[in-house]
Amino acid sequence: MVKIHERKFVSADPDKCVGCQVCEYICAWTKEKVFNPLKSRIRVVRLNPLVNISITCRLCEDPPCVAACPRDALTQSEENGTIIVDEDKCNGCGWCIEACDYGAISLHPEKKVVFVCDLCKDRPDGPQCVKWCPEEALDLVTADVLAQKARITATKKLFQEALKVALPT
Amino acid sequence: MAEIWRKIRLYGYAGKILHVDLTTGKTYTEPLNEDYAKKYIGGIGLGMRLWFDNSKAGVDPFSPENPLVLATGPTSGTVWPTGGNGHAFVAKSPQSYGIGESKSHGSFGTELKRAGYDAVIFHGKAEKPVYVWIDDDSVQILDASHLWGKPPAETEDMIKEELGDYYIRVAAIGPAGEKLVRIACIINEKTRAAGRCGMGAVMGSKNLKAIAVRGTHDVTVARPDEFLEFVKEFHERMKGPATKKYRTLGTPENVLVHNALHCMPTRNYNNAHFEAAEKVSGEYLNERYVAKIIGCSSCAMRCEHICVVNEGPFKGAMARVEYEPLWAMGPYCGIDRLDAVIKGCELCNYYGMDSISAGVIVGFAMDCYENGILTQKDMDGIEARFGNHEALVKLLEKMGKREGIGDILAEGVKFAAEKIGKGAEKLAQHIKGVEVTGYDLRSLKTAALGFAVSFRGADHNRHGAYAFDVKGKFNRLKYEKGRAKAVKDIEDVYTIIDSLIICKFSRGTYYKEFEDLAKLYTLVTGFETTPEEMRLKGERINNLARVINVREGLGRKDDHLPYKVMHMPIPDVGPSKGAYVTQEELDMMLDDYYEVRGWTRDGIPTPEKLKALGMDDLIPIVEAKIRKA
């Protein structure tokens, strides 16, 4: 099993995300060749105009969705940690949806099965949402890199004035 | 193969029109007429044609017989940047008594397309307040008495809660629409408005509080691979110079530009220059108030400058601010406080009023007050001097509630002036009953023509002719014969933009104009369209709108300019001093324009013109009017 420190998932920077839904459209197009956000593996939430973020699978360690499935339809990939849905076993009961803290799993609007981000495993250039995001708000990262980035952003904010002196623009 | 498939379904289009009769409670659908789709595209083009077919000449705007049409465009629900998200409302306007139309963006239009409809036509009038719940094929008319009196944002939250789905999209009217305030708008997703022409008042006259939509169907385009390549190209273009203004300072950048040229109407057109412009500039706004810039569904540029007030009497106010409302509630009222402007925008969202017209009406009321036409007593004790930001806030609230003086002001400047009398007409700055926008037409004479002939009344968004003046392409202080061609051409582009529906902020990214627009239309719908055919669609839609206005009794006399534009030269010392438009100049503009359009001297489209545009069925209307004239 891929180690948790090496597991990469798609993460949105809420400071950059503007709620435009391009990721939803591109995801549905990539996976199902239609334009329909209901078939997207990544979904946008806008709580109010200031709070926007798109959310998809975080590839949890000991994923609760896998544990919750009474039909053993969900497994975690040894290779990259994504959740694999066995569509023959899944009957769309929704236990996994309830178990997921992030709302990353959805019930397909037509087929009676659930679906979840697979990091565009068939695409050599990786997750298409990351590639298309006009704001570059999405990133394919490990938790460690996320922490590093957060630290750098926080430091930049703390030392705004000093940076202006050191790096005049 | 494509031909056979098309017989089963259309691309881009959903292929269906929904009729909702609020009087009888009956709903039914009809297939989208393919000929209409090709001729009128969608959005306002298709919407106006459907309105025309479903109405009788001379209908009162507040009569149940005035249908309210809601239309999406062929690009709605696709990932086309800015195009995927628009919707339009069309009805007879309670301001102009001609055709009214207004667009909004966000995500509402995408949902309606996925629900399976290109347009919805609301007929009649419900007995009591209702809202319409469109859930794919299921359409229900539900009780809205508990929502009556609520602002659009709260209405939306309550509907989502009771229908149990937080991804439902809602368009609603506020208290202003319920009370038939003539400048009432229809707000979707809490902050986005189909603002102009009083469409919210028409909705209110039908007792229709809101439209809630959930769509689960797929949207497909005819040539997806090429389409996505084109999308990618436009994503790149949108990162370039053509959209920079909207992505950075936003439209409030105009404040200092217009002010420098002395073409920013100030204090109800008493001036064309605002001495305190710096304090209401885009630069000032962005530095102090813009908290985040967000985007609509499928947009690649993002423009929505969300402003928040963090201190002072209006602490906590939040609204999206663009140049027009900022100008209307700022310089036009002589007000130099952006916190009050943001509060004003928030109040307009709360009551559901067009924030441009609302600001202009307050400016008009202040002018009446300063001239002694309205006394402090008439004003319910409000000291409505120019520059009094407290008066702005109070008057907006009164207008939204139709309370006291607000009841008169809620009629819009034209009808309010008629009620007030005492020469107030001369202070009412409107065209066809619709309040002016932030371009001083005395010193922008190409724009003056565009505004005068705009089919929905005073508006910059029917032509964008101000750009020729502001950018110095033409001598803005003097009209020269021959310019009408430029105005006509840009009008034809604008009707295409509003029919597809794409966003006007993205217009600069269509480098090859009709060629790019035709390519987009072809890839989405599969209807092979040349740039010339595309241009013809734009011209056809402008002529359709004119024929409707002619049917409703509008003509050359209505292609007028506001009183002060023609009688009060710009007093400010500076680059526009002394400028105004004379009657001879206006006549020259109109003659020039009608000739280029192929219309009669009275501004009626000729039978030959309509024939050439493939609208033979409209010929009897113009023939009757031409005989009369």
Image (cartoon, rainbow, N blue to C red):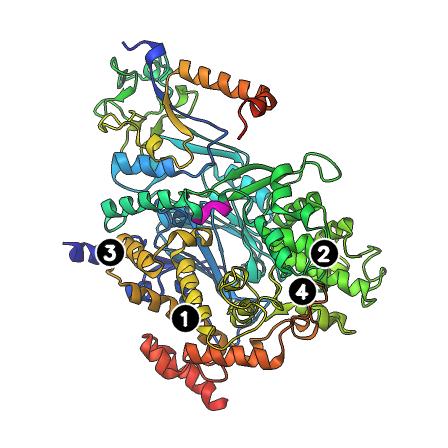
Q: Residues within 10 Å of mark 1 (few under 14, many from 20)?
A: few
Q: Are marks 3 and 4 on the same chain?
A: yes
Q: Amino acid at mark 3?
A: Gly
**How many angstroms separate mark 3 from mark 1 (CA)?**
26 Å
Where residue B411 is drawn, which disc sits there?
4
Q: Residues within 10 Å of mark 4 (few under 14, many from 20)?
A: many
Q: Residues within 10 Å of mark 3 (few under 14, many from 20)?
A: some
Residue at image mark 1: B53
User: Taking B622 as reference, is B417 left or right?
Assistant: right
In front: mark 3 or mark 1?
Answer: 3
Expressed as whole percent of the image width and height from the top left, the position of residue B479 reads 54, 74
- Pointer 1 chain: B
Of residue B569 and residue B19, the one placed in the foreground of this image is: B569
- The residue stretch that appears in magenta: B242-246
Q: First in sequence: mark 2 or mark 1?
A: 1
Q: First in sequence: mark 3 or mark 1?
A: 1
